[in-house]
Image (spheres, rainbow, N blue to C red):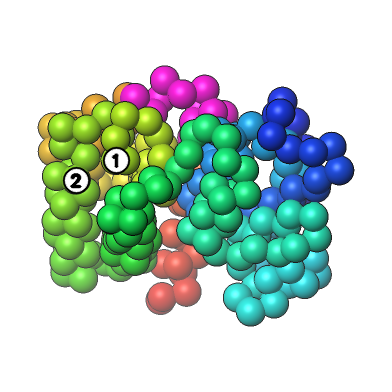
């Protein structure tokens, strides 16, 4: 499945070619698309069936054979966080995603890594465990979200007054996380528990490009429920 997203841009030559290998329900894939849309970079989006990966995906990411992969003028860049930095360094128009200040850049990378290696990793445990193990994972991810809540407290965005690197990495909280907890029938994430993150979410929702990266809710719920059913069946 393949389609092309065309955006106007004055920062990219007509001879440049940008492709994204992704998967519609992946927060890692969506963050790459969001960065390109914010920068106004036209790209071709190539949807991957992760149960039957294409030869092209394996060619462009032979090490991990995973999405997302950015292909720029024939050169392949894997891993979403690496791709975001590449996008920001290649196309220097606004919004600038990472600060020029060394400390601010280091802290942005720290929080991005925290989101991927802690919050999203623990969220997977919540999804694919049961009983006491799931209860422990829920407690763990709640504490991790509290740390993220404290980081955005008093700020318009994680990086300051405009959307940046950490905001894009944390974008899974805008749509994806709520769909997941609804499918699981749990209540980890609410405005009452995390008022500052929800204030940040409302700012995100006012950005057209964020809405363009919205995951279709009904389709996403069905996808999650199908995966959970397969997991439960395999666990018997």
Most foreground residue, 12 or 102 = 102
Secondary structure of the residue carrying tag 1 is: loop
**Percent position of residue 119, x then y:** 29, 58
The residue drawn where x is 75% and y is 31% is 6
Give above or below for 92 relative to 57: above
| Total numbered labels placed on residues in the image | 2
Residue 186 visible in rendering: yes
In the rendered image, which quarter contains the C terminus?
A: bottom left
Most foreground residue, 196 or 125 = 196
**What is the spatial separation of the Cα atoms under label 1 and label 2, in whole angstroms?**
7 Å
Label 2 packing within 10 angstroms: few (<14), some (14-19), many (20+): some
Secondary structure of the residue carrying tag 2 is: helix
What number is the disc on residue 151? 2
Residue found at the far bottom of this picture: 63
User: Which numbered disc, 1 or 2, marks the residue that appears first in the sequence?
Assistant: 2
**Percent position of residue 151, x then y:** 19, 45
What number is the disc on residue 158? 1
Direction from residue 196 to residue 130 in the image, left or right: right
The residue drawn where x is 37% and y is 30% is 162
Direction from residue 169 to residue 45 in the image, left or right: right
Q: Which residues are magenta?
A: 203-218
Residues tagged 1 and 2 counted as in contact (Cβ below 8 A): yes
Give above or below for 192 relative to 18: above
Taking the magenta stretch, the answer to whether it contains residue 63 is no
Taking the magenta stretch, the answer to whether it contains residue 212 is yes
**Percent position of residue 2, x then y:** 79, 45
Give above or below for 70 relative to 234: above
Direction from residue 15 to residue 5 in the image, left or right: left
Residue 183 visible in rendering: no
């Amino acid at each position: 499945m393949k389609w092309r997203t065309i955006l106007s841009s004055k920062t990219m030559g007509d001879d440049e070619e940008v492709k994204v290998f992704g998967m519609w329900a992946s927060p890692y894939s969506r963050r790459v698309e969001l960065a390109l849309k914010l920068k106004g970079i036209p790209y071709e989006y190539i949807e991957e069936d992760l149960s039957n990966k294409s030869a092209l995906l394996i060619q462009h990411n032979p090490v991990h054979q995973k999405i997302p992969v950015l292909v720029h003028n024939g050169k392949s860049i894997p891993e979403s966080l690496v791709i975001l930095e590449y996008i920001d360094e290649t196309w220097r128009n606004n919004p600038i995603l990472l600060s020029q200040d060394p400390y601010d850049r280091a802290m942005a990378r720290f929080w991005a890594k925290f989101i991927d290696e802690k919050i999203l990793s623990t969220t997977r445990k919540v999804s694919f465990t049961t009983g006491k193990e799931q209860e422990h994972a829920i407690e763990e991810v709640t504490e991790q979200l509290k740390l993220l809540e404290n980081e955005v407290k008093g700020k318009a965005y994680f990086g300051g007054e405009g959307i940046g690197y950490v905001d894009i990495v944390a974008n899974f909280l805008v749509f994806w996380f709520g769909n997941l907890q609804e499918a699981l029938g749990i209540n980890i994430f609410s405005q009452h528990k995390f008022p500052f993150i929800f204030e940040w979410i409302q700012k995100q929702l006012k950005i057209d490009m964020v809405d363009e990266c919205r995951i279709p809710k009904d389709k996403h719920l069905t996808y999650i429920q199908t995966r959970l059913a397969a997991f439960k069946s395999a666990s018997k």
